Image (cartoon, helix red, strand yellow):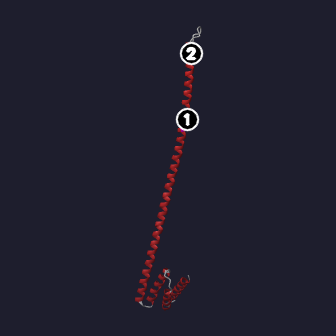
Amino acid sequence: QRPHYLMEVLILLAQINIINDDPGLAILQLNKALNINTKKEMTLRVKAYKMLALGYELTSEYQKSIIYFKKFNVLENIIKQRLLVVQQLQVNEQLHLFEQTQNQKQLQAENRKLQTSTQQLKKLSYATILIVVVVFLYLIFTLLHKKKLQQALLIYQRKMTFHPRTNLL
């Protein structure tokens, strides 16, 4: 972290020197800031290149000004490309999250439909079982009633065929 702060301080001092109309000292400070080996600090390097281009322009060294302005543009474009990649990744992540939530909502809706149809099938199966039991009981009672009627018919036929005077059948 220390090189970062040192680089930032040197750039701020150079900015003050440019404002105070001392571009020579600003150029020295900016070159010293760029010599600090921090490849991670691309935004500070962009500031330094831009200010170097301005400093060399103020000292009428236009060739060096153009060189540092080109370096400024190249580095700034690299930063923009990286930022674009990061933004694209964020958009893709948001799209992926959106698709996941849509799929989750769709699955929840399907789950509710399946639960509803399961409940309806349970009710239908209970009703079917109840009907089968009722029909079975009806058949049993009908068979028992038929048996009683047959027995009653047999007793009636015996009574009809019984001759009371002779006690013969």
Q: Amino acid at mark 1?
A: Val
Q: Residue at x 46, y 84 (%)?
A: 49
Rendered position, 134 above or below 2: above
In the image, 29 versus 160, the foreground residue is 160
Q: Which residue is mark 2?
A: 158
Say which residue label 1 marks. Answer: 133
Question: From the viewer's perspective, is residue 118 above or below residue 3?
Answer: above
Q: Quadrant of residue 165?
A: top right
User: In terms of depth relative to the viewer, which is nearer, 85 or 126?
Assistant: 126
- Work out which quarter of the rendered image holds the C terminus and state it: top right
Question: From the viewer's perspective, is the residue at label 1 or at label 2 nearer?
Answer: 2
Magenta residues, start to end: 129-133
Q: Residues within 10 Å of mark 2 (few under 14, many from 20)?
A: few
Q: Position of residue 149 (x, y in %)?
A: 56, 22
Looking at the rendered structure, the secondary structure element under dot 1 is helix
Which numbered disc, 1 or 2, marks the residue that appears first in the sequence? 1
Q: Position of residue 108 (x, y in %)?
A: 51, 54
Residue 168 badge: none
- Amino acid type of the residue tagged 2 in the rendering: Arg
Q: Which residue is more in the foreground, 29 or 106?
A: 106
> x%, y% of residue 72?
44, 82
